[in-house]
Image (spheres, helix red, strand yellow):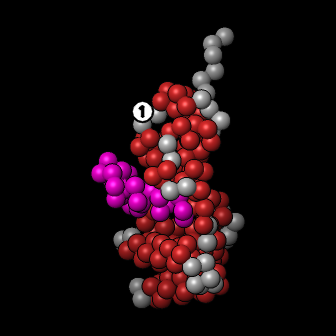
């Protein structure tokens, strides 16, 4: 019997170790050695699974989009009506994206790295494109039918704007106010169609 290939599990372990490092430190302070320590692996092992730190960063960006999209899909599977789907989508955006300071710290580190590294810019463009498209898809499934993803882009802009304010000043806005404003905006767009 051959050896079990644990590469996917190790890659996942290393990717989420980077997430943990970015959530507590700025990206400029995170080294592959620290990522390995967070993953409880010897430092040299990282290069067996990833060519570079940038490859880990790229993988993390995709994993984050996939994780939160799956979580939203699961949440939407509970509702039966368009109104329930819309409510679930907005609750998810508020609770899991806007007021999730750990995720936001990681996300803003990824954005900063994209400003500094040309090779990561395409990764972040893809991440934002998927973010907009998936939000547009979820909103469409919630009864907000649009021919393009402009509403998804608007909701991303609101989400990131509120997230940034909450990161800088945690008491700047309340969950209930943010929820109400996003829901109101989406409903207004629905009526304007």
Q: Secondary structure at mark 1?
A: loop
Residue on which the image places disc 1? 51
Residue found at x 66% / y 64%: 75
Which of these two is toward me, 147 or 152? 152
- Image position, residue 162 (x, y; %): 52, 78
Position above or below: 30 against 82? above
Task: Look at the image and tell me whether residue 94 can be seen.
Answer: yes
Q: With respect to residue 182, does 21 lie above or below?
A: above
Residue 51 locus on image (x, y percent)? 42, 33
**Is 48 one of the magenta-colored residues?**
no
* Magenta region: 104-130
Residue 151 visible in the current orientation: no
Q: Is residue 126 magenta?
A: yes
Residue at the outermost top position: 1
User: How far across and how far down the image is residue 29, in percent?
Assistant: 49, 50
Q: Residues within 10 Å of mark 1 (few under 14, many from 20)?
A: few
Q: In the image, 85: left or right of 27?
A: right
């Amino acid at each position: 019997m051959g050896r079990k290939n644990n590469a996917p599990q190790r890659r996942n372990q290393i990717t989420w170790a980077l997430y943990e490092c970015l959530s507590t430190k700025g990206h400029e302070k995170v080294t592959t050695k620290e990522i390995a320590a967070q993953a409880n692996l010897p430092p040299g092992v990282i290069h067996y699974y990833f060519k570079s730190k940038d490859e880990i960063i790229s993988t993390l960006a995709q994993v984050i989009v996939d994780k939160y999209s799956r979580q939203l899909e699961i949440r939407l599977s509970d509702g039966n009506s368009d109104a329930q789907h819309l409510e679930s989508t907005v609750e998810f955006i508020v609770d899991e994206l806007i007021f999730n300071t750990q995720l936001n710290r990681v996300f803003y580190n990824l954005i900063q790295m994209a400003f500094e590294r040309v090779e990561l810019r395409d990764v972040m463009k893809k991440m934002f494109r998927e973010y907009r498209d998936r939000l547009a898809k979820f909103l469409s499934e919630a009864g907000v039918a649009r021919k393009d993803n402009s509403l998804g882009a608007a909701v991303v802009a609101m989400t990131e704007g509120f997230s940034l304010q909450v990161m800088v000043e945690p008491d700047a806005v309340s969950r209930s106010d943010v929820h109400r404003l996003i829901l109101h905006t989406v409903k207004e767009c629905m009526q304007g169609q």
